Image (cartoon, grey):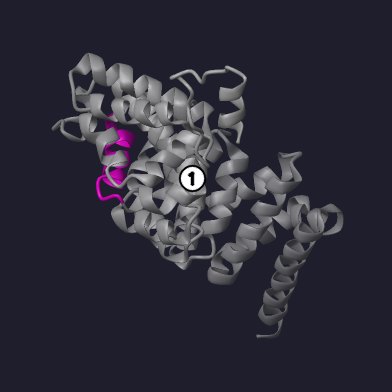
Amino acid sequence: MIEQWSKNQGIEFSNTVQYIDEEGLNKADCEHFLCLLKKMSSTLSDQKTAAKELRLLTKKHPCFRVLFCDSADAIPQLLKPICGSDSFGSVHPDLQEDVIATLLNISIHDNNKKLVAETPMVIPLLMRALRSGTIETRSNAAAALFTLSALDSNKELIGKSGALKPLIDLLEEGHPLAMKDVASAIFNICVMHENKARAVKDGAVRVILAKINKQIHVAELLAILALLSSHQSAVHDMGDLGAVPSLLRIIKESSCERNKENCVAILQTICLYDRSKLKEIREEENGHKTIFELAKNGTSRAKRKASGILERLNRVVHITHTA
């Protein structure tokens, strides 16, 4: 009807009229997207130009993230320039940064998470990026693993792939640009119990305690340590690495209630698994009443955990006196 009315009024439609689809993209946008993917198999100059534009499009326009979900070949085409190289470090820095950033942008879209993680080349490529990319690339690779690990099935896949080790290595390296993304990724992945054992085996407790003792990202790393403390092997590592004095010090010195909560929660778990550490805590209580003060003045969760430790201390003292 509109077309007929326009003809009757002498109005002609331009040949450049574009038809918008249900995702908010028009035909020209879709054709441009396919053209950019094709350039990813062209010369280095074309690859860099296309990768830069794909990064910007997927950052600013969520509709372009959807396109990657609609095409089975889109992700392999995107990754082809950096998958074909024997050494990730030999890939042009701008190209590696833009491709990994685009992969991160794609992963933000909920419907893409499963597809991205289950594309065979993705997780191995992210692991390579964590080890040998530029620091921006490494940070974005960690962020991609974080957002992908929102799905439980992806947590399992990422853990089994061995991605925790390069994340922990990057955490140990301690570059300030990457620390928060790495910590977030490790935390999310270790929500799955099987991955806690993997993290402990890969040295997570040692690295985390070393950073905490240097007062680096204490809140984020205490949260990971509290999560890992539900695994017995992690508790053994904490005992061997002298975690108890560090945790007691934070309770005394920190003004952050969440940090105190995590510290006392970890200490309670250590007490459950390792009675020998009760001596250290008892000595602290005799001198400073650190746990007693938390049981009296802490948050409800901190009070509950601190009271549990005090009860255990009292039971051990009573048993010793009556033995």
Residue lying at the far right of the rendered structure: 296
Which secondary structure lies at badge 1?
Answer: helix
| In the foreground, 151 or 262 | 151
In the image as oriented, which residue stretches furthest toward the top? 45
Quadrant of the rendered structure where residue 168 is?
Answer: top left
Name the residue nearer the viewer: 125 or 313: 125
Residue 23 in sight from this viewpoint: yes
Q: Residue at x 39, y 21 (%)?
A: 53
Residue at screen point 22% across, 26% down: 89
Q: Residue at (54%, 65%) from the top-left corner? A: 230
Q: 141 above or below 273?
A: above
Is 268 left or right of 290, judged from the image as shown?
left
Corner quadrant of residue 207: top left
**Magenta highlight: main SS:** helix
Seen in the picture, residue 54 relative to 141 is either above or below; the reply is above
Q: Is residue 56 left or right of residue 321?
A: left
Q: Which residues are magenta?
A: 119-133
**Front-lying residue, 170 or 253:** 170
- Please check the rendered image and state whether residue 192 is part of the magenta-colored stretch, yes or no: no
Residue 277 placement (x, y as % from top left): 57, 62
Q: Residue 103, position in %: x, y?
A: 38, 36
Q: Which residue is mark 1?
A: 147
Mark 1 surroundings within 10 Å by alpha-carbon count, few (fewer than 14), some (14 through 19), many (20 or more) = many
Outermost residue, left side: 86
Q: Position of residue 29 (x, y in %)?
A: 42, 28
Say if residue 209 shows up in the picture: no
Tag 1: amino acid: Thr
